[in-house]
Image (cartoon, helix red, strand yellow):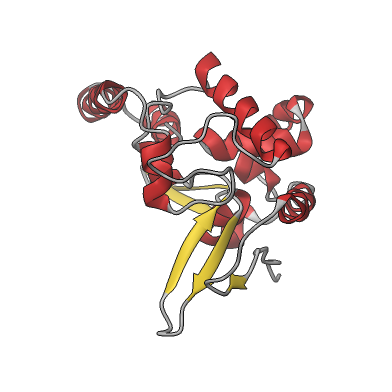
Amino acid sequence: MELRTYSLGYKPPTFSAVYADYVVYEQYRHEFMNQPRARAALLHKGLVWRLALHSIGFDALPSVLDGISREAVPFGLMLSIDGQTNFDDELSEEEVDFICGTYYIYDNAGNVGKISWWPRPQAWATSGLNVGFWSTRCEHWFQKRLDNIRDGVSRNRHLSTNDVNGPMTNSQWKTSIKFNTGTNKMRKNVHATCCSFLATKANGKNIFLLSLSLAHF
């Protein structure tokens, strides 16, 4: 079995994305979400999960409970607990980049950087929006970002990042969605408490289920 790969490709340093580029990206993302591996995107945390729902709709959520896709065993996540091997769907780093609308920018020296329409997990993880679940504030930010992209010009330009609602680098995204700095500390404390529980109280099936939950927190 071969896995089809999706990518927005490599662009020169002079590349300047326009709304038409975003439309093409969305069309490709919608196509990807019609593949069996779409379940892996619905299992993902944060913005990747929301982008998946934007492509296939909230009605697709119950399908996650139907079990792993046919691509989970050769290409997914393998967990061994108490001598038992379990499999689940998982996205590759390249697929996560693609879902976030990432372009690879090369320069004359052969170096490659990344810019993306949406913040990639590294930027999202340290943002004030990452509270462990999709909050009302997350949804408000998401809808506003969509509106601004469609308008083509930001209604509230972030001068520090020169944000004109085109693709941004990881550093620019971190500045743009930093918000409340205490949020990340709170999330880390919750995660540490959960890990402590796993180490001292849980066993067997409970460890497996909680490990999956933490993997997507």
Rendered residue at 61%/43% (across/down): 41
The quarter in which the C terminus is drawn is top left
Residue pushed farthest top?
136
Q: Quadrant of residue 75?
A: bottom right
The quarter in which the N terminus is drawn is bottom right
Residue 174 location, x and y as percent?
37, 42
Tally of marks: 0
- The correct choice, above or below, for 182 with respect to 114 in the image is above
Of 70 and 114, which appears nearest the observer?
Answer: 114
Q: Quadrant of residue 110?
A: bottom left
Residue 15 location, x and y as percent?
60, 67
Left or right side of 58 for 17:
left
Of 174 and 212, which appears nearest the observer?
Answer: 174
Rendered residue at 61%/52% (across/down): 101
- The correct choice, above or below, for 13 with respect to 97 in the image is below
Residue 173 location, x and y as percent?
43, 44
Q: Quadrant of residue 58?
A: top right
Residue pushed farthest bottom?
109
Of 37 and 130, which appears nearest the observer?
Answer: 130
Of 114 and 49, which appears nearest the observer?
Answer: 114
Left or right side of 184 for 214:
right
